[in-house]
């Protein structure tokens, strides 16, 4: 977004269907932001952006993908893709450790019968190192 001109230079299509309700944070030069919508059956994440290059640094999802640690706590299939875990509150940054901490919300949909199991890593805290981008 160009503040002086009031125009949008480009839109990140990866954000379609999501929204933001909190301020971003800057950690080690990376602008990081969370998202909302866990109750609508979205997959939570934290996005990183390089403000100097106006480019993305990466996306860290909050639900485990099949074959990765934590996936055994989700039902078989694609429930993790709609599992919630929104990062709707601004993360905290520890500059000494170069870590950010992001709380995650409830699972989606709210009716847990659609996603039996412990559903790691929703309703928890994620740590993200900016070098992990």
Image: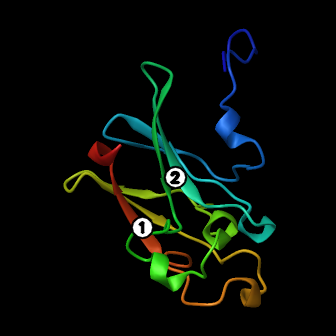
Label at residue 126: 1
Instruction: State the image coordinates of residue 96 (x, y, percent, origin top left).
Output: 19, 54
The location of residue 89, given as percent across then percent down, is: 59, 61
State the separation of the CA atoms marked 1 and 2. 10 Å
- 41 relative to 128 in the view: left or right: right
- Judge whether 35 appears above or below 117 on screen: above
Q: Choose between 5 and 51: the one closer to the eye.
A: 51
Report the residue at 64% width, 52% height from top.
Answer: 22
Residue at (69%, 33%) from the top-left corner?
13
Q: Is residue 96 above or below residue 74?
A: above
Q: Is residue 98 above or below residue 87?
A: above
Q: Give me the residue at 75% from left, 90% from top.
A: 113
Residue at which label 2 appears: 46
Label 2: few (<14), some (14–19) or many (≥20) C-alpha neighbours in 10 Å: many
Question: Tag count in the figure?
Answer: 2
Q: The N terminus lies in which quarter of the figure?
A: top right
Residue 47 lies left or right of residue 30; in this view the side is right
Closer to the chain start, of discs 1 and 2, is 2
> Are the residues flagged by discs 1 and 2 in contact, CB closer than 8 Å?
yes
Dot 1: element: strand
Q: Tell which residue pokes out farthest to the left in this image.
A: 96
Query: Tag 1: Cα neighbours inside 10 Å, few (<14), some, or many (≥20)?
Result: many
State the residue at coordinates (74%, 49%).
19
Callout 2: SS:
strand
Q: Which mark is residue 35?
A: none
Foreground of the two, 3 or 75:
75
Position of 122 with respect to 112 (left or right) is left
Quadrant of residue 24 within the rendered picture? top right
Give the colouring mode of the picture.
rainbow
Which quadrant of the figure contains the C terminus?
Answer: top left
x and y, in percent, of residue 64 in the image: 49, 69
């Amino acid at each position: 977004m160009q503040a002086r001109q009031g125009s949008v230079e480009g839109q990140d299509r990866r954000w379609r269907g999501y929204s933001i309700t909190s301020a971003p944070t800057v950690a080690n030069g990376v602008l990081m932001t969370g998202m909302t919508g866990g109750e609508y059956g979205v997959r939570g994440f934290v996005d990183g952006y390089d403000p100097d290059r106006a480019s993305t640094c990466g996306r860290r999802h909050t639900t485990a993908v099949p074959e990765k640690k934590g996936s055994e706590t989700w039902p078989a299939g694609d429930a993790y893709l709609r599992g919630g875990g929104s990062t709707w509150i601004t993360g905290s940054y520890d500059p000494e450790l170069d870590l950010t901490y992001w709380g995650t919300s409830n699972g989606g949909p709210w009716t847990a019968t659609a996603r039996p199991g412990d559903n790691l890593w929703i309703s928890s805290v994620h740590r993200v190192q900016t070098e992990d981008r």
